[in-house]
């Protein structure tokens, strides 16, 4: 579980702890607190792990949703979700 608001360098450092685990997925929180989502793609490419879920708010479990690549790519490219 990773915060989307963290710097890429910090995210890489966190995921290095899990390098020996070969089968895990990523969960990103706090998507509602940032406009820059490129680190989701960067970290997915760095780890080769799938992104399973994202959260966009404080209400659990209502704000947990399955990751939708099309929505995120649209946001990265500057479009509305």
Image (cartoon, rainbow, N blue to C red):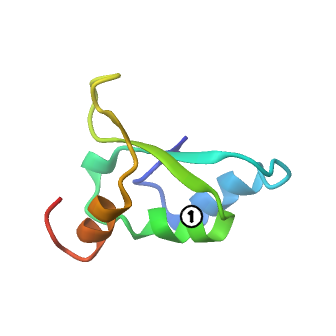
- Residue depicted at x 52% and y 71%: 42
Give the residue furthest to the bottom. 77
Task: Provide the secondary structure element on which disc 1 rests.
Answer: helix
Q: Residues within 10 Å of mark 1 (few under 14, many from 20)?
A: some
Would you say 1 lies left or right of 13 here?
Answer: left
Which image quadrant for residue 38?
bottom left
- Residue 80, horizontal then vertical, whole percent: 13, 64
Quadrant hosting residue 48: bottom right
2 or 53: nearer the viewer: 53
Q: Quadrant of the N terminus?
A: top right
Give how far across and how far down residue 16 sits, in percent: 75, 57
Kindly identify which residue carries mark 1: 44
Residue 72 in which image quadrant: bottom left
Taking depth in this image into account, of 77 and 10 the one nearest to the observer is 77
Figure label count: 1
Name the outermost residue toward the right.
Answer: 20
Residue for point 81% across, 47% down:
21
Q: Can you say whether 3 is above or below 36 in the image?
A: above
**Percent coordinates x, y for residue 5 in the rendering:** 40, 54
Vertical side of 35 occupied by 2: above or below: above
Q: Residue 7 at x, y = what percent?
A: 49, 62
Say which of 53 and 29 sits in front. 53
- Residue at 29%, 56% in the rendered image: 34
Vertical comparison of 39 with 65: above or below: below
**Would you say 1 lies left or right of 61 here?**
right
Which residue in the rendered view is the most extreme toward the left?
A: 80
């Amino acid at each position: 579980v990773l915060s989307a608001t963290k710097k890429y360098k910090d995210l890489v450092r966190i995921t290095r702890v899990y390098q020996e685990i070969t089968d895990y997925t990523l969960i990103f929180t706090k998507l509602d607190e940032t406009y820059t989502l490129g680190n989701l793609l960067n970290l997915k490419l760095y780890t080769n792990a799938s992104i399973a879920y994202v959260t966009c708010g404080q209400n659990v479990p209502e704000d947990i949703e399955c990751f939708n690549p099309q929505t995120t790519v649209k946001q990265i490219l500057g479009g509305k979700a």
